Amino acid sequence: MNKKILLSLLILFSCPFLLTGCGSNSDSNSTKSNDIFNLKKKMTCTKEEVDDDGLKTTDTMEITYNSKKVLKIKSTNISESEPEYIDMQLNLGNAFAEKFSELDGIDVKYEKTDNNEIKSIMNVDYNKINPEQIKEKLGDLYDETSGNIYSSTNYTIDKFKEENLDGYTCD
């Protein structure tokens, strides 16, 4: 008789664990579904232009995103210039880079790659930028009316393409 009571109690107390699982509140299908939505994807977009003087500019954007939003971008610009203006352009670019690099989530570098070529790289981490801080630090340099890659922290890939990739070819 005692064995029957003991066995009944054991079954009674083990049923909730058998029915609900041991300590897991999440549905495994839900977890798999969330993993799919959070997978990081990369897209590379390029745009080449030649000005009236025959000087070429190549822009490349590497965009890291998941199904919900853009996470990071790396924007690389390589611009040809007249050799007599290259140092002035580099100095202006470095002043620009210094101002932007004071901001959270943005890193900008300029370098002279040739006698007539400047390369700039801007990295933006959308999990770290603060558009209000950007407006405050840049003051008059900040232009809300033109599309810019640092005006929002919540771009979907489609919205980012629409607002920032006109004329680009993406893979």
Image (tube, rainbow, N blue to C red):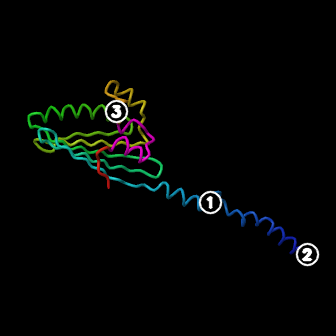
Residue 137 position within the rendered picture, expressed as x and y whole percent measured from the top left: 36, 27
* Residue named by callout 3: 146
Q: Quick check: 125 above or below 18?
A: above
104 or 93, which lies in front? 93
**Residue that appears at 34% across and 41% down:** 164
| Amino acid under disc 3 | Ser
Image mark count: 3
Task: Give the mark, 3 or 1, whose residue is nearer the N terminus.
Answer: 1
Residue 32 placement, left or right of 131 = right
Q: Nearer the viewer, mark 2 or mark 1?
A: 1
57 or 121, which lies in front? 57
Task: Give the mark, 2 or 1, whose residue is nearer the N terminus.
Answer: 2
**Residue that appears at 36% across and 49% down:** 63
Q: Give the quarter of the image for residue 16.
A: bottom right
Q: Nearer the viewer, mark 3 or mark 1?
A: 3
Q: Rounded to the nearest whole Å, what is the CA distance between mark 3 and mark 1? A: 44 Å
Residue 128 position within the rendered picture, expressed as x and y whole percent measured from the top left: 42, 40
Q: Rounded to the nearest whole Å, what is the CA distance between mark 2 and mark 1? A: 40 Å
**Residue that appears at 25% across and 45% down:** 59
Specify the farthest residue to the left. 84
Task: Give the mark, 3 or 2, whose residue is nearer the N terminus.
Answer: 2
Residue 112 placement, left or right of 130 = left
Q: Rounded to the nearest whole Å, what is the CA distance between mark 3 and mark 2? A: 83 Å
Please say whether residue 104 is one of the residues in the magenta stretch. Answer: no
Q: Give the quarter of the image for residue 4.
A: bottom right
Circle 2 residues within 10 Å: few <14, some 14–19, many ≥20: few
| Amino acid under disc 1 | Asp
Residue 106 placement, left or right of 81 = right
* Residue named by callout 1: 27
Please say whether residue 160 is one of the residues in the magenta stretch. Answer: yes
